[in-house]
Amino acid sequence: MDVEKVTEVAPAADDDGRLRTGTVWTATTHAITAIIGSGVLALPWSVAQMGWILGPIALVGCAYITYFTAVLLSDCYRSPDPVHGKRNYTYMDAVRSCLGPRDVALCGIAQYAILWGAIVGYTITAATGIMSVVRSNCRHYKGHGADCSQEGTMYLVLFGLVEVVLSQLPSLEKVTFISIVAAVMSFTYSFVALFLSAAKFATNHRAYGTILGSKIGGPGGVSAPTRTWNFLQALGNIAFAYTYSMLLIEIQDTVKSPPSENVTMKRASMYGIGVTTAFYVSLGCIGYAAFGNDAPGNILTGFDEPFWLIDLANIAVVIHLVGAYQVYAQPVFACYEKWLRSRYPDSAFFHREYALRLPGGRAMRFTMCKLVLRTAFVATTTIVSLMLPFFNAILGLLGAAAFWPLTVYFPVTMYITQAKVPRGSRKWLALQALNVGALLVSLLAAVGSVADIVQRLGHVTMFKTQL
């Protein structure tokens, strides 16, 4: 009996020799993980500063702007033709190809500053999430009046140790499973916060809140300067909550073709931003309806019971941040490692691979460069998090500085250059108007963030993170 031998056909490599396996769904999970952060829990407070009219408008408007510029940026992955042109592997490569070397320095500073700033913020927020779990259990078993204050130094260090291990994963393509888990966790704590807010709203039998948001003066009101700073900070929080442009090109570089990479990435951006917007609008508005102008900065802190459900949400926040840390860190690793390999082409430290045998017959491959420098990066980030427990306030300033160039200016300008949009045409004027509007939002948000930083500086103790 003749047995026909079946030969498996290996997936074909792309035009640059690399084998990419990403799909619209893996790109969507990366996008959701990058967009949805623990900042979603602050959206009810942000809506409370803006009121029932401007709050929802800001949530939907920022989502549309982010999607619009993401579509423009997707066409810049290849240049000069968006389908058959030369690949740009990073955001900076796209800027260099479309605009030239003069704009690369500004792009690099803005992109990697906000990526690293977000990583520091994630480290602090993860420690805060663990402390929230401990405090919630303490209050449940010892009573709500018990002293349940917590210090987060140990939790910061533990989170750093976990990230040291995960940082040895080779690239963004290899953290897809972590990204999927992180996306599921973001849905988990968002759903819990939404459920608790909806339950409180139902028991109130009415919607709280006002047309213009928090009041000035009187019982329950704030001073005029505080009202102004809070409004500007809320505008910035909402605008920056959607940003992921600094990772879009890197995510697109994991996608296989056909269909062309820009088509896949546009779909992934639509799905990712669409899902994110649904969560943001629902939680922001229902949370505001439940608490009114007294909405807390973190919506989960507004609830004490059921403690197990609040614990579940905070644990989900921590797990999500474990994955989001790597989604933000891997492009940073890829940037400096690529530069070092090209600078020292004969150095074994940067090129020689070692294999560590793992259970199941698998092996983890690494270079000494990855082992040493990635560990040093995570350690430095953890130390900075310990030194500056108010860094989340500085992160708002970094976000304000990066929002305009990364989310709007570079995508719009690259698109105008690559698509050869005629100067002075309606399309050109509309895109420039978007540029100016985004710049104004960034400047106003920066003012609010600086005011918040100045206020926090008077109440901070280095190497002491408290809830």
Image (spheres, rainbow, N blue to C red):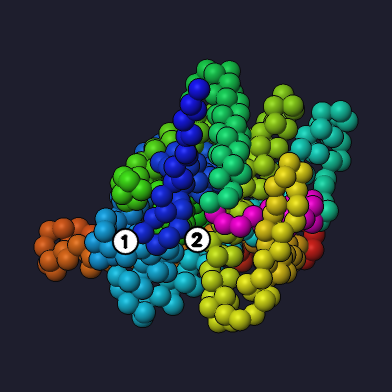
The quarter holding residue 296 reads top right
Q: Amino acid at mark 1?
A: Arg
Q: Residue at x 44, y 42 (%)?
A: 9
Main structural element of the magenta stretch: helix, strand or loop? helix
Question: Horizontal and vertical percent for residue 229?
Answer: 50, 57
Earlier in the chain: of badge 1 and badge 2, it is 1
Residue 147 lies in what quarter of the image? top right
Q: Looking at the image, is 315 positioned above or below residue 93?
A: above
> Which one is nearer the viewer's eye here, 170 or 456?
170
Residue 304 screen position, x and y as percent: 72, 30
The segment highlighted magenta reads 155-172
Callout 2 amino acid: Gly
Residue position marked by numbered label 1 in the rendering: 78
On the question of residue 425 being in view, the answer is yes
User: What residue does disc 2 label?
Assistant: 399
Q: Residue at x 27, y 55 (%)?
A: 83
